[in-house]
Image: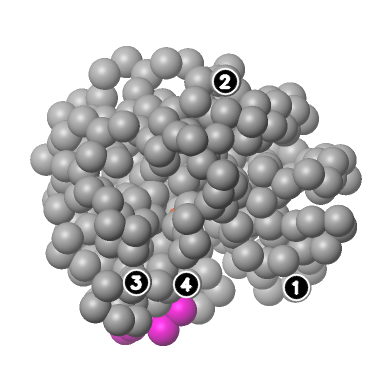
Amino acid sequence: MRGVGLGLRSALLDDLLARGPEGLPALGWLECHPENYMRRGGRFPDGLARARELWPFATHGLSMSLGGTDPLEREYLRTLGGFLGDLAVPWHSDHLCFSSAQGVATHELLPLPFSEEAVRHVARRVREAQGALPVPLAVENVSYYVLPTPSTLDEGEFVSAVCAEADCGLLLDVNNVFVNAENHGGDARKIIEKMPLDRVVQIHVAGHWYEEPSFIIDTHSEPVREEVYELLAFTLERTGKVPVLLERDDDFPPFEELYAEIEQLDAIWRAAPEPAKKRAMR
Ligand SMILES: [Fe+2]
């Protein structure tokens, strides 16, 4: 898996299939949310199967609740494992957060406190999930709007400790780092530098919305901002050529506008150095 990918959403499927890889040379791969396809019939799985014939895929889960306190759902992991095997993905990712409590799904990505106790808790569950899946698991840093407490570590220290203790990969979302730095008064480049950059297997990039001059919402429904392109280049200089994915979830522009963003990301990716030999996941 190399170059720039796009998050597959149903609104994008017809444009992707009509153009194909020949019409979209800057697009190297696609990412999908398994929750949108598992145990579903009809047009969704059919479109996924057609897209899979044309591009390699990675998968990005929404509901594992790795930081939660409910037991990991064995039936979900079993179904997910079969889905990942059918799609032949190189890895699967989910969020470093919790999204359900006492059996109730919140449909939100809620942050964990940056503490040693949370590191041990979530790392144990990441290892458990990895053991149930047929491919390596990477965790993604999330955006948060309230500082998680009680925190004794900073975000980079927390993510590094989880990845080391779980021996897992990192999906580094540079837009989430940017949003957190802006909203909570940090320096995005310093946060990136404290992340475990030797464990990054994939990068996410997205657009965000300035609700107020000092308050950003991570919408995934805006074009990527220039500052985030710059942060991506800064990150890729340090990780080397790691696959980069554009997340666009809503307010889709004409497909040519979205593809222009992919071309801009691809130019940044091509300018990055080749990666140092990665530590094996698992
Ligand atoms: Fe992301």
Residue that numbered label 4 is attached to: 249
Residue at coordinates 70% horizontally, 26% vertically from top-left? 124
Q: Earlier in the sequence, mark 3 or mark 2?
A: 2
Whole-number angstrom distance, CA of label 1 to CA of label 2: 41 Å
Circle 4: element type: loop
Three-letter amino acid code of the residue under disc 1: Gly
> What range is drawn magenta here?
250-254
Q: Earlier in the sequence, mark 1 or mark 3?
A: 1
Q: Quadrant of the N terminus?
A: top left
Mark 2 Cβ and ligand 1 under 8 Å apart: no
Task: Name the quadrant containing residue 201.
Answer: top left
Frontmost of labels 1 and 3 is 3
Report crowding for label 1: few under 14, some 14 to 19, many 20 or more residues within 10 A (C-alpha).
few
Residue that numbered label 2 is attached to: 165
- Residue 189 lies left or right of residue 18; in this view the side is left
Q: Earlier in the sequence, mark 1 or mark 2?
A: 1
Circle 1: element type: loop
Between 253 and 198, the one nearer to me in the picture: 198
In the picture as drawn, the residue positioned furthest to the left comes out as: 271
Q: Earlier in the sequence, mark 1 or mark 4?
A: 1
Q: Is residue 81 above or below residue 147?
A: above
Residue that numbered label 1 is attached to: 42
Residue that numbered label 3 is attached to: 216
Q: Earlier in the sequence, mark 4 or mark 2?
A: 2
